[in-house]
Image (cartoon, rainbow, N blue to C red):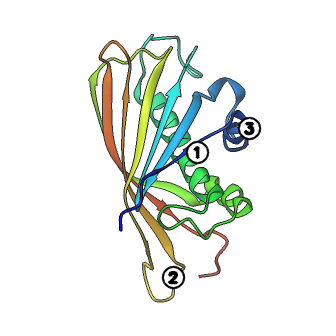
Amino acid sequence: MTTAPTLFENSPAELDEVLRCYKPHCRYLKSLAVTVDGDRVIGTGTFSIPEPCYIDDTGHLNAVEVGICYNQLLYQTMATMVRHATGPVLADWTMDEFLRRYLPDVLIADSRNVFRRAIGSASFSGEFVIDRAARYRPGPDRAERIALETSYRFWDERGGACDGEIRVVVLDTGATA
């Protein structure tokens, strides 16, 4: 029997809870909906960058901002999975555990980014997908880790586009091994 995908819309309070680690002017993610379909998880969000946080305004999304937006999609999607005890590998986490671990334990291990056409930074959309997720041990005396094979894309209404693939590793810095 196949179950229908489940959609979770994030409230402003849920966004604020996870994005609190960002300076207020760097909270680019404005809304997020997460669809869970078995082990496939898709977070779709809207963004706005009124002014870059580190450079004069270029008017288009650049690699630094893509990284920040990707992280915000990643964190918020993970939080939604934890909050609703759904999706692969995180359903057994508590929200307290997530909030303790998401900054020190979630690492980008590898990334590939492709910029196809300039994206206007004032208003654009993004999608984050967990393509594969697995728990593993890097050695018999090492703490368990989680590997997330993810993909993303950003776009605007004028045809701007970029996409990429990012491998994320979730460590357990609180573990003894």
Is residue 7 rendered to the left or right of residue 21? left
Amino acid bearing label 2? Arg
Q: CA distance from mark 2 to mark 1?
A: 28 Å
Q: Earlier in the sequence, mark 3 or mark 2?
A: 3
Q: Which residue is mark 2?
A: 142
Residue 46 seen in the current view: yes
Quadrant of res 61: top left
Which mark's residue is nearer the viewer, 3 or 2? 3
Q: Secondary structure at mark 2?
A: loop
Which mark's residue is nearer the viewer, 3 or 1? 3
Amino acid bearing label 1? Gln
The residue positioned farthest toward the bottom in the image shown: 140
Q: Residue at x 52, y 35 (%)?
A: 68
Quarter of the C terminus within the rendering: bottom right
Quadrant of res 99: bottom right
Q: Which residue is mark 1?
A: 76
